[in-house]
Image (tube, grey):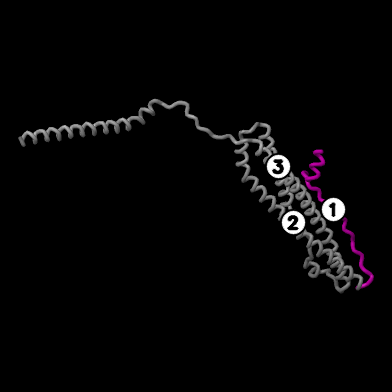
Amino acid sequence: MIKQYIEYLHLKKEIVDEIEISTYQKASTKELANSHLNYLKEIYNFQRERQGNIESKNSQLVGQASVIISIIALFIPLLIDKFSNIATFPFVVIIIGFVFVLFHYLIAIIHSIKTLQINHYPYCTRSTNTVTKENRADNEEDFIKEEIEDLVWSIGKNTIQNNRKGKNLIFATRSFRVATIGLCVFTLLILSLSTIIKPDTQKIEIDSISKSIIKDLNKPIIKELNKLNNRKEIEQLNQSLIDIKIGIDSLKAK
């Protein structure tokens, strides 16, 4: 099972397959040589288009996996905080789910990003040496033959590199598919746990209040009450003075 899993995702060292390149035999006529040349040019152009398509798809896969990883990393602290109070086993399952999904997205990125290492994928193309070397072809038929030989060699070598990049794309797609399926299952698990687990209500209970706090709170209240009591005494004193004055005035009138 583990061996099949490793082979399925290609979690091992790459083995480069070689293609046997045959030697071109000179055509019997010039017209036949031109037909061979046109045929090989079509194959050469096909390999160039194939190279561009594979590299483009690998780049898209890198971008998609990176975006998903960023989104997951954004929600990890929120989910961990939400489920931090649950039992140990469900919490461990959640952590393992995160690691599983992120690991496979990372494998997809690693496989895809290999195609960007251009020094590991040497391609062959036509060279000016064909027409500048000393023993270059002296007539058209010999030149066509040499051009055909260059194309045969280039197509063989370029096919090897495109096959390598194609394998990277296949393994990256497999990892991306496993990670996406795991993310869907993990999301359903999170939703199920969210419906089962009830959030804890935060309550603040005051068991006892310090007497010193009550005493400190009562000081300004007592002061205000004393002020009110003093005001009443002053009012009573003023009323007594007014009564005395009225009595004195009545005696003077008599």
Quarter of the image for residue 196 reads top right
* Rendered-image quadrant of the C terminus: top left
Q: From the viewer's side, name the closer residue of 66 and 155.
A: 66
Which residue corresponds to the image point at 38% horizontal and 28% vertical from the top-left?
214
Numbered label attached to residue 188: 3
**Structural distance between the alpha carbons of marks 3 and 2:** 29 Å
The answer to whether residue 87 is left or right of residue 211 is right
The answer to whether residue 27 is left or right of residue 102 is right
Q: Secondary structure at mark 1?
A: loop
Is 7 located above or below residue 53 in the figure?
above
Q: Reading the chain from its start, which is encountered first: label 3 or label 2?
A: 2
Numbered label attached to residue 2: none
Q: Position of residue 1 (x, y in %)?
A: 82, 38
**Residue beneath disc 1:** 18
* Magenta segment, prevailing SS (helix, strand or loop): loop
Q: Amino acid at mark 1?
A: Glu
